[in-house]
Image: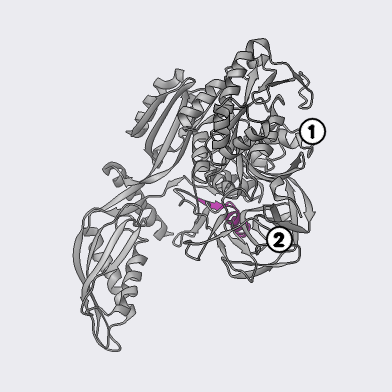
Amino acid sequence: MTDLSKYRNIGIFAHVDAGKTTTTERILKLTGKIHKTGEVHDGAATTDFMDQEQERGITIQSAATTCFWKDYRMNIIDTPGHVDFTVEVYRSLKVLDGGVGVFCGSGGVEPQSETNWRYANDSEVARIIFVNKLDRIGADFLRVVDQIKKVLGANPLVMTLPIGREDDFVGVVDVLSKQAYVWDDSGQPENFEIVDIPADMVDDVNMYHDQLIETAVEQDDDLMMAFLEGEQPSMEDIKRCIRKGTRTMDFFPTYCGSAFKNKGVQLILDAVVDYLPSPTEVDPQPLTDEEGEPTGEVATVSEDEPFRALAFKIMDDRFGALTFVRVYSGVLNKGETILNSYTGKTERIGRMVEMHADDRNEIDRAQAGDIIAVVGMKNVQTGHTLCDPKNECTLEAMVFPDPVISIAVAPKDKGGSEKMGIAIGKMIAEDPSFRVETDEDSGETILKGMGELHLDIKVDILKRTYDVELEVGEPQVAYRETITQEIEDSYTHKKQSGGSGQFGKIDYRIKPGEPGDGFVFSSSVVGGNVPKEFFPAVQKGFAGMMENGPLAGFPVLDVEVELFDGGFHAVDSSAVAFELAARGAYRQSMPKAGPQLIEPIMNVDVFTPEDHVGDLSVTLIVVVA
Amino acid sequence: MIKDQEIGVSGVRVKADVPLSEMFGYIGSLRTMTSGRGQFSMEFAHYLPCPANVSEQVIADEKARQEEKKKK
């Protein structure tokens, strides 16, 4: 059994180009997993292993990687930075216990860093901060620290200070131990010396050291009292306090360096070990019932509990289907049978592997706290809970936003359509924010996603990974319809000429609903003019029609329908008759209720270097008008 | 609608609510304008009524598309 306090499940997140992948690479190199470090711009980075990623120089999928540092086991999830892949960030955050936020030393806090930061706040993920690229021209550590305060509203706790700027950046001073780490020019991370603090930095280091101690002791009242009475706390006590404050997100230990130049990365690893929480220290995942309501129970991270795990990522690579799983509690042995609580089906665990980006180790056993991949699972999708068949449970369901953009695709040659179908099926299992519909009238395949780039990449994957040649249509906005006026109306469905008759009369109000509520149905019929058993039929009739708006056939949102009266026939009334009445009522009344086309509005966040502000404002205004 | 404009040390960030339909290809023009240094991110906020001219156009296009389909 492994000591859970020596586990760290961490994610590394940052803006595109802040150096996240390079930082991950350096960590893997230092921890001895790979010997030759891949450079992103050469297209050989270990975590970016899809063709599309290497060409675009961005990380699309979170690859889970296991490595070891000073007897601690680290599972690193590499997260994508571009907003079109926000779903992946969400999904990764869900299974993490802590994170490293990487910021660019010259670019500072960029729009996406802010978005990801907010998501991490929502998920209450403790983080340390790494200000990277200090060798870059224009890099300024303290300016970024300031931005973190102002823009993110976070409290960065300065742990290291840079020695030298830009080209002259040679190392860092550890503010806590007051030691200077200086690297030589070889680019090797292990070639460093511990030297005295440069004379011109002594005052600064002392100042930050005092700040650090003062902030840290606030976490412990006894220590605080002793400190105020002039007693210097011990190193262990300070570290314990920093650890506590990090976990409660009172502050974020902040480091600096240059991953590319291999300077300062060890200190990050030490910080992960020293300050980020182990799986047992974070709040346990709540369990929910089938509707996603919390049951009050939690999945305590312990081997003695029944097995509970969450599938957070499905990937189909050249080795076959991989299901990435975070084990929350219990133990999973090879050959055991587990229950997928979403589908209600059981499945036997054939092979389990520990992932190292593109490589893997076979394992026989996984335990609470582990992040592993299971090979060849069927009928499992992202977000499904896997559990002990004798102890059924559901971990909090993951909610994904609805897609707002769509494109039509068709295979170039007839033979491609079957291949495309299979490929798309696999891609949907991998990415729940990606959806597919077939247009019933035209037979076109419609891909739906979160943004232009998201769909671009899906088309690319179809072309390259699955070798399907496609005709791609123009991107389409997901327009919707709603209504603006309240209307009271009545409709009678009647067919009583020969044979068994049909009769249903409904009196109803249709009115605009609250934004975001979708379709809401209620009934206030008294006296049984419409018998209760027909309410669901009326609701079904309206709901079915809401897919098809009165203006142009777009789905209808935010409409309330209230059934308040009606009439029935003892023999001829039936569920079908009332459903048809509702459908007729919809057709009759919706065009009179002030139908209105609505479009998705995006929160846009643009950042531009100062000299282009004029141009930017003009374009944005043009865009907005 | 521009909600917020903030002048930072290294540049300016602008936050705005913009219809998705206006954002197609925006990353391209932003990069051109700023020599590749500008950046933007966006996420879905909510639905709002389309302006009448857009609405008419979209409805007309959609109806034409449906006509087209029926012919096939």
- x%, y% of residue B27? 48, 33
Q: Position of residue A474 (x, y in %)?
A: 47, 45
- Crowd rating for badge 2 (residues with CA inside 10 Å; few <14, some 14–19, many 20+): many
**Left-right relation of A570 to B22:** left
Q: For residue A276, which numbered disc appears in the image? A: none
The answer to whether residue A414 is visible is no
Q: Is residue A173 left or right of residue A250?
A: right
Q: Secondary structure at mark 1?
A: loop
**Which residue range is magenta in the image?**
A408-431
Amino acid carrying mark 2 in the image: Val
Quadrant assignment, res A128: top right
Q: Chain of mark 2?
A: A
Q: Residue furthest top?
A: A200
The relative height of residue A259 versus residue A385 in the rendered view (above or below) is above
Mark sitting earlier along the chain (2/1): 1
Front residue of A439 and A527 = A527
Residue bearing mark 2: A331
> Observer-nearest residue: A13 or A212?
A212
Q: Residue at x 76, y 58 (%)?
A: A365
Choose mark 2 or mark 1, whichever is in front. 2
Contact check, label 2 and label 1, Cβ < 8 Å? no
Question: Are callouts 2 and 1 both on one chain?
Answer: yes
Q: Quadrant of the N terminus of chain A?
A: bottom right
Q: Is residue A68 above or below residue A553?
A: above
Left or right: where A287 falls relative to A328 = left
Between A282 and A19, the one nearer to me in the picture? A282
Residue carrying label 1:
A36
| Subunit of label 1 | A
Tell me: residue A302, above or below residue A496: above
Q: Position of residue A222 (x, y in %)?
A: 56, 36
Disc 1 residue crowd, few under 14, some 14–19, many 20+, Cα 10 Å: few
